[in-house]
Amino acid sequence: MMAPVFAHGQLRLYLLSLLESGPKHGYELITALSDRFGGTYRPSAGTIYPRLARLEEEGLVTRYDEERKSTYALTEAGFAELQARRGDLADLEQGIAETVRDRASQVREDVRGAMHGLRADLAAAAQQAREHAAPASHADAHTASHVHRVEAEQLVQRFRDDVRAELRRADANGHVERLTVETLRTVLDSALSAVRSTLR
């Protein structure tokens, strides 16, 4: 289980820092936080909005409601608090950088663990299939091999098309993270090894 991302009061401070560059909707703040953590953490609306409401009560942010959307902006008091806590913010940024590295590493290890289990399952299934396979002529074996190869290539092509579609959809919203690339690399490397283990 991953440790909590923010200690008590840290998310409050970081929300103020995100608003320093200008007013933002709640969704924009959630996205900005997700981007800062490289996609390894994305706060829920139930986490962000109550804290924004608390900041508003404290007079540190103000809210503007337009077209069913709420926009939040720093007040002078909010800017003053942010200025007074620059040192705390610098420490928080350093902690976030370390958290991102730790969470990314854990995600990669989780993926590798899952793929290792998949490789073991595939190898066992392949061995069992060989043990129970009925003897076949060379011609029959070649025909079956060709059919299986075509089916496998179709699966690879479908996977490629699906991943490309998902990547382009996410990229249109600026949501492709470095973690996505690292995860894809880990999965594909492990998948290649798993497939090789089934081939003779």
Image: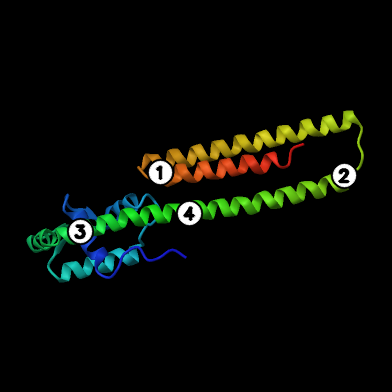
Q: Where is residue 141 in the image (x, y as percent from the top left)?
A: 85, 33
First in residue order: circle 3 vs circle 4: 3
- Closest to the observer: 26 or 134? 134
Q: Residue 89 carries which label?
A: 3
Distance (Cα) linking label 4 and label 2? 39 Å
First in residue order: circle 4 vs circle 2: 4
Q: Position of residue 107 (x, y in %)?
A: 48, 54
Q: Where is residue 102 in the image (x, y as percent from the top left)?
A: 41, 56
Secondary structure at numbered mark 4:
helix
- In the figure, residue 6 lies in which quadrant? bottom left
Q: In this view, does 132 lie to the left or right of 49?
A: right
- Closest to the observer: 180 or 62? 180
- In the figure, residue 14 lies in which quadrant? bottom left
Distance (Cα) linking label 3 and label 2? 65 Å
Please state, as top left, top right, bottom left or bottom right, where the C terminus lies in the image: top right
Mark 3: amino acid: Leu
Q: Residue 150 carries which label?
A: none
The residue pinned by badge 1 equals 178
First in residue order: circle 1 vs circle 2: 2
Distance (Cα) linking label 3 and label 1? 24 Å
The residue pinned by badge 2 equals 133
Kindly identify the residue that appears in the image at 91 percent across and 36 percent down: 136
Q: How crowded is mark 2: few (under 14 residues within 10 Å), some or many (20 or more)?
A: few
Asked if marks 3 and 2 touch (Cβ < 8 Å), the reply is: no
